Image: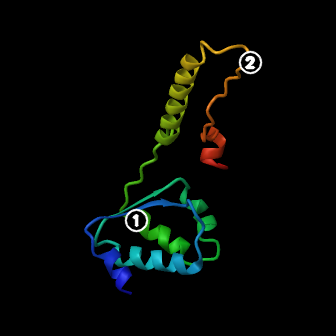
Amino acid sequence: MRKIRAYCQPHLLVIDEVGYLSYSDRHADLLFDIVNRRYENKPTIITTNLPFNDWQRVFPNASCVVSLVDRLVHHSEIFLIEGESYRLKEATERSQSRQKVAGKGNKKSDSNTTEQAPLTAALSEEDRIGDK
C-alpha cells in the first residue's frame, strides 16, 4: 500500500506506454486504484499507442477496464499524435550515415572485397503501429 500512496502523492503523474505489454488482473486493479485515488484531484497523463477500445487486450481478464477508462477520459484532454517515430527516424539517419562512411572507406578496395551494409533495427510502418 505504501507504493500506491507514493504514486498518488505527486501533483502530476505520468504513466508512459500503457499497452506496450499485457498485464494481469492484479496489475489492472493496482492501476485502477491509483487512477481512482487521483480521479478529480490530481492530473494524470497516460501515453499509449492503443485506442481505449483495445485496452481489453492489455488487461485481458480485468473487470475494471471500463471503469478505468471512464475515469481517465472524464474531464480529459485527449491528444492524438500521428507521425513518424523519432526513434525510427534517428535509427534510419544513423544507418544512412554509417553507409556513407562505409562507402567512402571502400572506394580504394580491390575487386575481391565485398561491401556489407550495416544492419538496421528499423521496423516497417505496419510493424510499428500494429493492427488497426
Which sits earlier in the primary sequence, circle 2 or circle 1? 1
Locate residue 116, reporting x and y percent: 67, 28
Q: Quadrant of residue 114?
A: top right
Q: Amino acid at mark 2?
A: Asn
Residue highlighted by disc 1? 74
**5 or 119: nearer the viewer:** 119
Q: Residue at x 25, y 68 (%)?
A: 11
Q: Which quarter of the picture shows residue 12?
A: bottom left
Residue 59, disc:
none
| Residue 35 as seen in the image, left or right of residue 48 | left
Identify the residue under disc 2: 112
Nearer to us: label 2 or label 1 = 2
Residue 10, image quadrant: bottom left
Query: Label 1's element?
Result: loop
Query: Most extreme residue toward the right, as rendered?
Result: 112
Q: Nearer the viewer, residue 60 or 22?
A: 22
What's the residue at 50%, 80% (across, down)? 29
Q: CA distance from mark 2 to mark 1?
A: 67 Å
Are the residues flagged by discs 2 and 1 in contact, CB closer than 8 Å? no
